[in-house]
Image: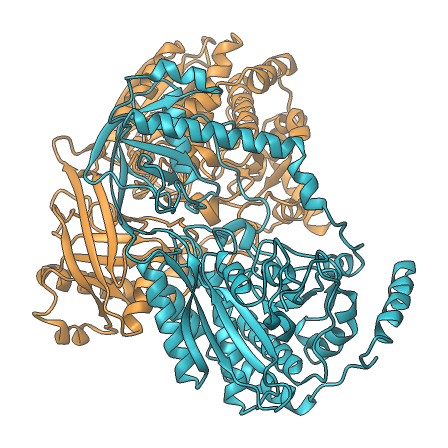
Chain colours: A orange, B cyan
Amino acid sequence: MKRNLLLTTMLGVYLSAGFAQTESFDAAAIQKIRDEGLKNSKVMQTAFYLTDVSGPRLSGSPGLKNAQEWAAGQLKALGLQNVKLEPWGKFGKGWQVDKYYAAMTAPYYHALIASPKAWTPGTNGPVKSEVVLLIADSVAQLDQYKGKLAGKIVIFDSKTLTTATNFNADARRLADSDLVKMENAAPQQAGQRRNFADSPQFREMMKMRTMRQQISAFLTDEKVGCILTLARGNDGTFFTSNGASYAEDAKPVAPELEMSGEDYLRLLRLVKGGIKVQMEVDTKTSFYDQDLNGYNVIGEIPGTDKKLKNEVVMIGAHFDSWHAATGATDNAAGSAVMMEAIRIIKAVGLKPKRTIRIALWSSEEQGLFGSKGYVTEHLGDAKTMVLKPEQQTISAYYNLDNGTGKIRGVYMQGNPQVKPIFQSWLQPFNDLGAKTLTINNTGGTDHLSFDAVGVPGFQFIQDGIDYGTRTHHSNQDTYDRLIEDDLKQAATIVAAFAYNTAQRADKLPRKELPKAVSDSK
Amino acid sequence: MKRNLLLTTMLGVYLSAGFAQTESFDAAAIQKIRDEGLKNSKVMQTAFYLTDVSGPRLSGSPGLKNAQEWAAGQLKALGLQNVKLEPWGKFGKGWQVDKYYAAMTAPYYHALIASPKAWTPGTNGPVKSEVVLLIADSVAQLDQYKGKLAGKIVIFDSKTLTTATNFNADARRLADSDLVKMENAAPQQAGQRRNFADSPQFREMMKMRTMRQQISAFLTDEKVGCILTLARGNDGTFFTSNGASYAEDAKPVAPELEMSGEDYLRLLRLVKGGIKVQMEVDTKTSFYDQDLNGYNVIGEIPGTDKKLKNEVVMIGAHFDSWHAATGATDNAAGSAVMMEAIRIIKAVGLKPKRTIRIALWSSEEQGLFGSKGYVTEHLGDAKTMVLKPEQQTISAYYNLDNGTGKIRGVYMQGNPQVKPIFQSWLQPFNDLGAKTLTINNTGGTDHLSFDAVGVPGFQFIQDGIDYGTRTHHSNQDTYDRLIEDDLKQAATIVAAFAYNTAQRADKLPRKELPKAVSDSK
């Protein structure tokens, strides 16, 4: 209670700074948006094209390019203006899997669930070998394997030799108690992230990474046939990542598979149990280096108000995915919701005062590159804080990237001034479960790129569903895991937020700039 | 309460028929069993050999034979007598997978999680084809496809186009409320099973089966390249079955894959969405017809009491599995528990009065064939009820086949006379969660073969864990899903029950014979 009183007092100060205490909005327009979004949704059709039809949308891959072109075509068909694939800078090489086959062939036959790690080469023809256990806690220990691994399939030890049985459900929604906790959370301290970099955990992580790189270099030099890596996940689900750099000048690495827990651990238990294991791997991957640039899909509904049309509300989501599934919840979901939000606004014939711009980012998975590149190009440099005039024109950026779960509220990203505004805007959707505002930041996605240059950037609070346990970067992040009602709800709320932001007398209130630096003007 | 009073009264009657109201047992022996079983267990080593090392143990396969020979060797090494692979009759052909590869190759590449259905032929070289949707609610509708399917990969429609998200945990234990319900359950009515055969559900099932057989015959005649079937399961887990008969004279069928839900439904959604889908399948399977017999592994600890040594206590579990994993919970678990129970009795140096015999059945999965064959050979014919003298010598048969879950009690199989006996015998294990007796029958496994000829046959009540949701006949029924503490507990209790039964003054009380027929004497 004390915290709330304090917050109210703080807000009183902010409120006097220039916006109405009771935030008004066009209730009739919002009702139209709600009707269109909930009763006439096209979000699943869009999601179908982004997932099943397009396939994996790994950064730089032909799959991503095809999907981007399809999305741009859709935005044009909706009547958006200035639709384009806008380069955001140099990414690196594209990559895709052209063939995956791996099986244990002795002591008996068993086909294995796995995938090449992103940006690793294929075996280009079958590699047949005994599975060799490599145990090395230090680089010095690698010496014993020197000259013995050429053409071999290599496996590493694991602390746990079985995957866990699931006594908890994969999927859950935020409970009321979770939401109350978020609502009452204390503002996060600046520098929390920096503190991690000084932590023993971080140092251990970096040590392990260096160690892995040294092992990788050793194995590449030794010309191993294939490296097997234990992937997180169970029951046939496994989580993927990259096994090499996408950089144009990346060092060569050995072929490497990321394998489902049960299959990997069976091989490991056998090898550790003294049973000779034979395997066959036949993979093919392709690299694409003709165009090293990364692209974002951009389009807009131009503003109609003489004074305000040069100001912009942005909505966005990253469009790229990992490679072992179709990136349904990460992040076809967010992309489809954003495309649907735009469709809703067009479909109900609203004429926003400010311009509403959609951005479908790429290379979020490698470090928010698409949104960072966009921000650097248009708004300013987050490092030097040299800002461009356009920085002043963006009222807000709204992002969706936490899976298929419906919207439960908004992370205010440390900006308490938006609380009464968002509270008011969420009111028509309280019945759909969206009502929580938390002062907290959330990280890991593209609103951070905007936040970093002082533009209000927000990620919605979403029900987690099975994002953490089952889908996020996994081989099972498929259309099946999308929940239609949740995506409809999210698209409707995003459309409402975008429209309300476009119609508001003022731009959204801003926090202090991250660092006090000179403006480029 | 009323039911309990009634039951007590009923039991009073039975009790007067010849056994002590308070069932006694050798507490010191049971304590030794408990110490050995819980503190010096070898059950996981046995399970490792039955699963990881042996691989799938499909009826008739070389994998099963190897595992049977290993198990017989283990029993001999334990000092058991009369250890043998005993033929139980003619099974049919063996079968195994020698290669599995399947991938979608357009609109993009995606390797598919699936397996040949048991006893189907392989493609024997790559089959490349468009995926063709076959919609036929009646055989007449097949005509439209005549002459169009040669070499094609065929998919069927599905009522649901996505797999379900798991909002419930895969694994759970029986709650106290479940156990109370079982304890208080009314005896099942005889004839319930027969009634199902008259039900509309059963007629519909048989109609569908006939329809499927007709479609299968049609597709085989048309020489399709491969049939795709939607398997139950999700997240990379799929459940398997047979796609053809194992009979020596089985009709030829087309190659057929049982595919994980997400992969199958992606193909189906694409095809139904008008997207051309190309696939490649390359599978190889082998048939084995040199020895069509089925075998059970049998061994025994001979009884030491002059009068009682010709009487027998049997413990058993089926040893065969499905083919897409290593049948860890179905039923390496039960087999390892039974082998461990025997080991415990030998290890603590007990000298049972009656003979204790272990039987590891085969072809349970095809219809309890191993145990039925054994019973017919040794005990009598369950159809004619012509019984053999040996039928009188078996005091009880104890079975374990409901997964990895620990023992929570016993299904009394409609025999209330065993209640005070089992209650007493369970007492030393109440602290390990085993205390529930239900009058109910449970079906689907090998104790039924004994029950059918009037020999007391019991299956233990077990915690379900993830048997129904994740492991039972699935491609994920692996060593990972075994829970060590549960298997230790189960082996300890089985050892105690076997020993107590061997030492008891009388054989266990019997129910009335299923049908009054002449004895073979």
Percent x, y for residue B427? 73, 78
Instruction: In the rendered view, tell whether residue A145 sits above or below residue A74.
Output: below
Front residue of B448 and A459: B448
Decide if residue A159 is in sight here: no
**How many circles with numbers are drawn on the protein?**
0
- Can residue A415 be seen here? The reply is yes
Q: Position of residue A305 (x, y in %)?
A: 47, 9
Work out which residue is located at the far front of the displayed protein and give it: B521
* Nearest to the observer: residue B263 or residue A321: B263
Left or right, residue A417 beside residue B194: left
Front-most of residues A430 and A171: A171
Q: Quadrant of residue A336?
A: top left
Picture quadrant where residue A71 is located = top left
Q: Position of residue A257 (x, y in %)?
A: 25, 52
Q: Is residue B29 shown above or below B335?
A: below
Give the side of residue A166 with respect to residue A229, left or right.
right
**Which residue is located at x 72 percent, y 51 percent?**
A2
Give the position of the N terminus of chain B as an image quadrant: bottom right
> Residue at horizontal 53%, vertical 48%?
A170
Q: Quadrant of the C terminus of chain B?
A: bottom right
**B181 above or below B255?**
below
Q: Residue at x 58, y 51 (%)?
A: B169
Q: Quadrant of residue B150?
A: top left
Question: Taking A292 as reference, is A168 left or right?
Answer: right
Find residue A308 and report its horizontal and vertical position in percent: 46, 14
Of B364 and B382, nearer the camera is: B382
